Amino acid sequence: MPQPLIGIVGLGYVGLPLVRAFVSCGASVIGFDVDQRKVDSLQQGKSYIRHLDSSWLQVAIESKTFRPTHDMSRLE
Ligand SMILES: NC(=O)c1ccc[n+]([C@@H]2O[C@H](COP(=O)([O-])OP(=O)(O)OC[C@H]3O[C@@H](n4cnc5c(N)ncnc54)[C@H](O)[C@@H]3O)[C@@H](O)[C@H]2O)c1
């Protein structure tokens, strides 16, 4: 079965745990946010949500199963 590709718009208190849930199920996720600082932080594997540790994030970024972006044209 092909790996599903999920798009999540808004990478805050709701969106980021959703990213983790989908990635942990084996999906690939493109995450969209208008806040460049958040996108930059996520691309460096750093979580800005205190209760959400960064270990899963670093693995997801390195493996490209989670790709954060502010480029909304990628929604297509
Ligand atoms: N946190 C909760 O418990 C909760 C509960 C019920 C409903 N909600 C609703 O869920 C939504 C998200 O809540 P949250 O707590 O994750 O907020 P949040 O502020 O933590 O995250 C929202 C994220 O969306 C980004 N964003 C804003 N406009 C955008 C746009 N046009 N395109 C892409 N990204 C955009 C922001 O930069 C931010 O990172 C809100 O509408 C909120 O009212 C939240």
Image: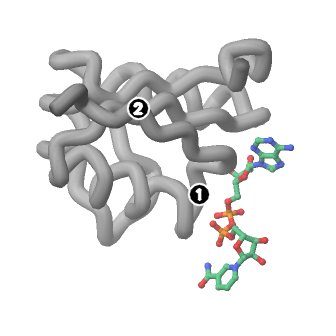
In the rendered image, the quadrant that contains the C terminus is: top right
Q: Is mark 1 within 8 Å of ligand 1?
A: yes
Secondary structure of the residue carrying tag 1 is loop
Residue at 55% from the left image edge and 38% from the top image edge: 7
Name which residue lies at 45% across and 54% down: 16
Queried on whether the Cβ of the residue with tag 2 lies below 8 angstroms from ligand 1, the answer reads no
Label 1 CA crowd tier, 10 Å (few <14, some 14–19, many 20+): few
Q: Amino acid at mark 1?
A: Gly
First in residue order: circle 2 vs circle 1: 2
Q: Which residue is mark 2?
A: 5
**Residues packed near mark 2 inside 10 Å, few (<14), some (14 to 19) or many (20 plus):** some
Residue 59 location, x and y as percent?
13, 30
Residue 74 placement (x, y as % from top left): 67, 15
Looking at the image, residue 30 sits to the left or right of residue 11; the answer is left
**Element carrying mark 2:** strand
Q: Where is residue 45 shown, x and y percent of the image?
A: 30, 30
Circle 2/circle 1 CB separation < 8 Å: no
Where is ligand 1, by quadrant? Answer: bottom right
Q: Is residue 54 left or right of residue 67?
A: left
- Measure the C-alpha gap from mark 2 to mark 1: 20 Å
Residue designated by label 1: 12
